[in-house]
């Protein structure tokens, strides 16, 4: 039996079904991030209406608040936030990178000072499995060591080896069977290390493979090259999840290179700053030119916000700092990604993905390197 | 022809239909406040689902931002915020009280320094009629002079006389016929002045009467006494609107004294601080005792928030400072008032309002005087 059925492919890109204990997901898929059991400013009903198939929760944050006792009462994160579709949880490994000033890493695990109250906590491969078991997520991640993009090869190799030792400890600790535990490919920007990491993981025949340690300061070209290399080292018949990547152009470029799953806080974070996605690029709705526009922000968009409100109203809500602005903009950006993925899937099924990608990249003005750095910084706050 | 049809009464309390250009309202009614074209954290769809029949917009705020040119493009506030039921707009008179440090009042009108950018603007009885005509609200207020509760009788009488002169100027300036212009009874805490003000207004046979200058620092007893006196001076067959009052106990006590319409920012403001209404009083959902409660905050409540989420989840959202907390709490508090008004109306129709009031007041622990002052302060920020 397999959890992953490929329905269609077009070169390295593919459309597939990933089966989980809370139902099936059609990939490629973007997963909105509910860091603290809420995708910021949205309810679970909003996520349903956007067409989200699966969301992501952060173990580190949920472990600290509300804390595992609460999830004991509820039986998991699904019931707590009233979301009945699949959930993927991360392991806290990324926070070992992003909250650098708050942690120490040793062979046993990662010792954190809580960003909330300064209390000290240790996340180990075993405790992280236990936490995710209590969150009862459908897909879990093992604790990993994530380094900045400018790390040297020796450091990256040591981190990768430790990540693999931690995966073995995770597998020993794992008791649930319905939860899919992915392996995380590390190796920084070194192709030979990526190959070694992928080989080690593949030897364990994991139900899915995450690509970690990217979108941590490197250039877009470096990231795309590394994604392309890494997917080539992974088995075709298993899902690949690129962690922490989610701008529209990155989705197109990385689906092209064989990625199936994505998550990122960027779409909702930039939304809260008034930056809305369009097929021409990221557009700032707080710009004066929207003040009098009584049409929707995007007439062709079928999201709740564009269906019900004008660009001028959303512009005004941002200017007046009304909370509704953040909700409407977040809905638009997540819906945009759902729609983009639908178009990508359709073009793969029709063997027209190359044309779609060319068209998309011709029209879409990508975020520049400055914005890229903002994205890395945004992630590091997660 | 009359815009106001009384369907039932029980002593001074009554159930009636108020007809406006955007449909009929069943009174008594609480009107949520959309200061800046949004009831804070809620969409117009949320307001529909809560059962809001009419909302309030603030002329002063909307005049400054987005500004009247924008409403020219949209044809009014309804289209701008996508709300198709009635809207009442205030005149800016209250901001002449609450933004004291930013204004000067003379016979011509009120000169404001904008709270946004310090620019200087004059609101006159005529300009306020013009602004509300452009907002195209269903019910409009004339510019009035509102004083603090500790003002002396001479000042209050002068303010009242000026308010009446301004009303006459407002009537001269008014061109639209579909908009109902209410008269505002002033007179502070002086019954004879309230009587004089009511007499003057009644002589003009206004389509409705507002009771102004209350909830500005006086005690609850003083307010209830003044409401009781004022309604006794007003014609029975016209709607009475008590401006800026909206705690649950105030609604019960003032419907009892013959009031038909209410507005207040308090229900949504306290919601954003985690204070939820219940039939036992105002309850703080941020209290530790809600941390593990997997039942709704109020099992008998049929609001969206209680129907979909546990008290523990809402507790967590507040602790984690998630925007969704403010939306869910605001929905609950406004729905509570809708439900309270429905129960009040039913008891009036059944001639059981006295019993309902006794029961309500026996169970409901009212906010204390400290909270009362907070309410006045909250209003003064509007």
Image: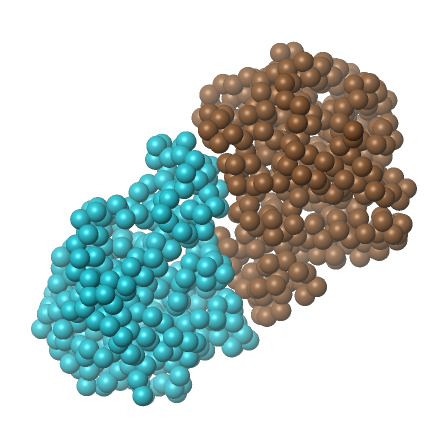
Chain colours: A brown, B cyan
Coordinates of residue B281 in the picture (x, y in percent): 26, 46
Q: Residue at x 42, y 76 (%)?
A: B23
Rendering quarter of residue B334: bottom left
Coordinates of residue B10 in the picture (x, y in percent): 18, 68
Q: Residue at x 61, y 16 (%)?
A: A126
Question: Is residue A362 toward the left or the right of residue B68 in the image?
Answer: right
Asked if residue B39 is positioned above or below residue A189 in the image, the reply reads below
Q: How many marks?
A: 0
Asked if residue A295 is positioned above or below residue A285 in the image, the reply reads below
Which quadrant, please, contains the N terminus of chain B? bottom left
Question: Is residue A268 toward the left or the right of residue B263 in the image?
Answer: right
Question: Is residue B367 toward the left or the right of residue A219 in the image?
Answer: left
Residue, far top: A107
Q: Residue at x 34, y 80 (%)?
A: B180
Answer whether residue A277 is visible to the viewer in this image.
yes
Coordinates of residue B63 in the picture (x, y in percent): 43, 70
Residue, far left: B192
Q: Residue at x 52, y 39 (%)?
A: A81
| Frontmost residue, B198 versus A372 | B198
Answer whether residue A321 is visible to the viewer in this image.
no
Which quadrant, please, contains the C terminus of chain B? bottom left
Question: Is residue A27 toward the left or the right of residue A98 in the image?
Answer: right
Asked if residue A67 is positioned above or below residue B19 in the image, the reply reads above
Coordinates of residue A201 in the picture (x, y in percent): 79, 21
| Frontmost residue, A33 versus A363 | A33
């Amino acid at each position: 039996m397999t959890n992953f059925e490929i329905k269609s492919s077009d070169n390295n890109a593919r459309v597939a079904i990933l089966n989980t204990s809370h139902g099936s997901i059609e990939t490629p898929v973007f997963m909105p991030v509910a860091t603290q059991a809420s995708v910021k400013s949205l309810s679970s009903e909003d996520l349903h209406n956007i067409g989200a198939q699966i969301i992501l929760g952060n173990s580190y944050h949920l472990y600290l608040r509300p804390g595992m006792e609460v999830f004991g009462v509820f039986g998991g994160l699904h019931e707590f936030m009233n979301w009945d579709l699949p959930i993927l949880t991360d392991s806290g490994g990324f926070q070992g990178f992003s909250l650098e000033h708050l942690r120490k890493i040793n062979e046993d695990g990662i010792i954190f000072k809580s960003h909330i109250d300064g209390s000290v906590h240790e996340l180990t491969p075993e405790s992280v499995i236990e936490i995710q078991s209590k969150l009862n997520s459908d897909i879990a991640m093992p604790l990993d060591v994530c380094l900045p993009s400018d790390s040297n090869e020796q450091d990256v190799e040591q981190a990768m080896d430790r990540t693999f030792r931690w995966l073995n400890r995770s597998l020993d600790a794992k008791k649930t069977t319905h939860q899919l535990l992915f392996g995380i490919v590390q190796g920084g920007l070194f192709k030979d290390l990526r190959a070694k990491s992928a080989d080690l993981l593949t030897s364990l025949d994991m139900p899915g493979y995450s690509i970690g340690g990217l979108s941590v300061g490197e250039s877009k070209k470096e990231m795309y090259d590394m994604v392309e290399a890494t997917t080539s080292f992974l088995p075709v018949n298993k899902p690949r999840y690129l962690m922490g990547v989610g701008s529209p152009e990155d989705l197109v470029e990385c689906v092209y290179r064989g990625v199936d799953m994505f998550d990122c806080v960027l779409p909702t974070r930039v939304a809260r700053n008034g930056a809305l996605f369009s097929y021409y690029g990221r557009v700032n709705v707080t710009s004066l030119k929207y003040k009098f526009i009584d049409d929707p922000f995007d007439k062709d968009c079928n999201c709740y916000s564009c269906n019900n409100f004008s660009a001028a109203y959303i512009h005004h809500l941002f200017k007046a700092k009304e909370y509704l602005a953040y909700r409407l903009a977040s809905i638009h950006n997540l819906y945009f990604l759902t729609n983009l993925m639908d178009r990508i899937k359709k073009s793969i099924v029709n063997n027209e993905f190359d044309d779609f990608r060319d068209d998309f990249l011709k029209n879409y003005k990508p975020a520049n390197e400055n914005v890229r750095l903002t994205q890395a910084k945004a992630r590091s706050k997660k």
